[in-house]
Image (spheres, rainbow, N blue to C red):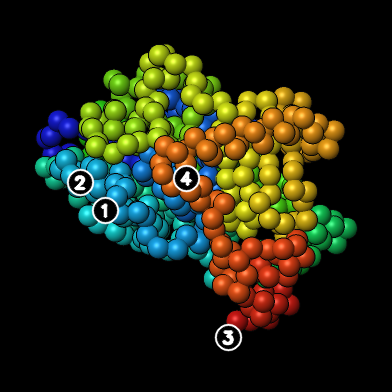
Amino acid sequence: MAAAQSRPNLILMGIDSIRADHMSCYGYERLTTPHLDKFADSGALFENTISAHIPTTSAYGSMLTGRDTFGTQVVALRHRGGLRPDIKTLPEMLRAVGYDTTCVGFTGNPSARGFDTYLDYAAWGSWATGRSPKAQKLNEVAVPELERLAAGDRPFFLFLRHMDPHAPYLPPAPYERAFYHGNELDPGNRSMDPVMAFKPFRDFFRMWMPPGITDKDYVIAQYDGAIAYMDACIATLLESITALGLDDNTLVVINGDHGETLYDHECWFDHHGIYDNVLHVPLLMRFPGRVPAGLRLAGYNQHKDLVPTILDYLGEETDQDLDGRSLRKLVDGEMDTFETGIYITECTWMRKHGWRTPQFKYMHALEPDFHFKPEIELYDLSVDPGEDHNIAPENPELCDYFEGRIQAWIAKREAETGLPNPVQNQPHWHGNMDIEYFRSSQEAYDTLHIGDPLQGQRLQAGESED
């Protein structure tokens, strides 16, 4: 049982690559998250949480500092160097006031600086190594650590990074067939042809997708199965919290760093781009007696609001200048929403920025991308939520308006921070030191690559590994 101490604990679960719209508590037709659905009923669910800075490195930079990308100066997946020394991370803030802090599964990330204890677990997989029980591996590390922290005489912060929805999607039985009942090798199905023809990623896909895969729906079902498997394992964590007597004095937060593209927009089974499939992430929060049960809040918020929210509910203060605001203002009904005009960035496999409002999404490519997409994209989300029809060509004045919003925001934030906009100052952001910025989509397509081509070819040919 938990040791007697009055200051609240914090458990933060960060889920990598989780699409809010593939969770049943967010309305997905498949029952992927029954345990998280129940968890949401016991607290608050935020319907419109936006991951403004894609991907993982920049998203967690905001989640764990309370700052946007101007404040962190972290925008690229392959960020070089650590976090600026003048910025405090959430574990550093809480350590300073006496918290015992542990991080599971997130060593090496710039924003993970400052935990007392770092623990890792096996969080990857391939077709050669078999099904990948990532969430159970996390539990095997996290539950004993939770028991240790609960037995102590200090409040604690336990951060858990879940990796199941992240590729490779290899959920164990019975989840690999839970949402699929067809023939993934059907020769008459050609939906995977363009995926396996995409040279930058095809070797990676060959490393973990079934040899001869033809049906995209099978791969999507694996993603959904990974979510359902993780959900069941999270139930074990939630039961452990209850068994240890921690429920009433522990703030539990579940957040996603970004979503996943799956088959949408030809951005095959990854998490790049700034379409809403990547931007819209879940945020669930439970704190009995402080957060009313059964709340569903439609107000817009961002990752930068997470740290101010946590500090507010824990009753702690910081000397840091945070960019976000406490979501308690939404929970308590003081405000309906935060910013509805949101500056968005992506610096993963493409370098783009844009502006999102409840009705419109405007995107501006800062250099040619490897999908050969237009420089400017504009979508009316009110009639085209899937962002399938680019209306930029017939709306030049509206594009000029949103470009003006972007430039005004950049000027404002650069003046406030005294720092440049990082997405506009990222030479070699893709990791190739011979190329600063891509001059054409063809150059980007020919340069970018992930995966081992020889291993991929052997697996697809049915050959055994050495």
Label placed on residue 115: 1
State the quadrant of the N terminus. top left
The residue where tag 2 is placed is 95
Residue lying at the far top of the rendered structure: 333
Q: Are marks 4 and 1 in contact (CB under 8 Å)?
A: no
Residue lying at the far bottom of the rendered structure: 466
The label nearer to you, 4 versus 1, is: 4
- The Cα atoms of the two marked residues, 4 and 1, are separated by 22 Å
The residue where tag 4 is placed is 69
Determine the residue positioned at 54% across, 58% down.
Answer: 426
Determine the residue positioned at 72% across, 24% down.
Answer: 382
Look at label 2 and name its amino acid: Arg
- The Cα atoms of the two marked residues, 4 and 3, are separated by 44 Å
| Among numbered discs 3 and 1, the one appearing first in the sequence | 1
The residue where tag 3 is placed is 466
- The Cα atoms of the two marked residues, 3 and 1, are separated by 39 Å
- The Cα atoms of the two marked residues, 2 and 3, are separated by 47 Å
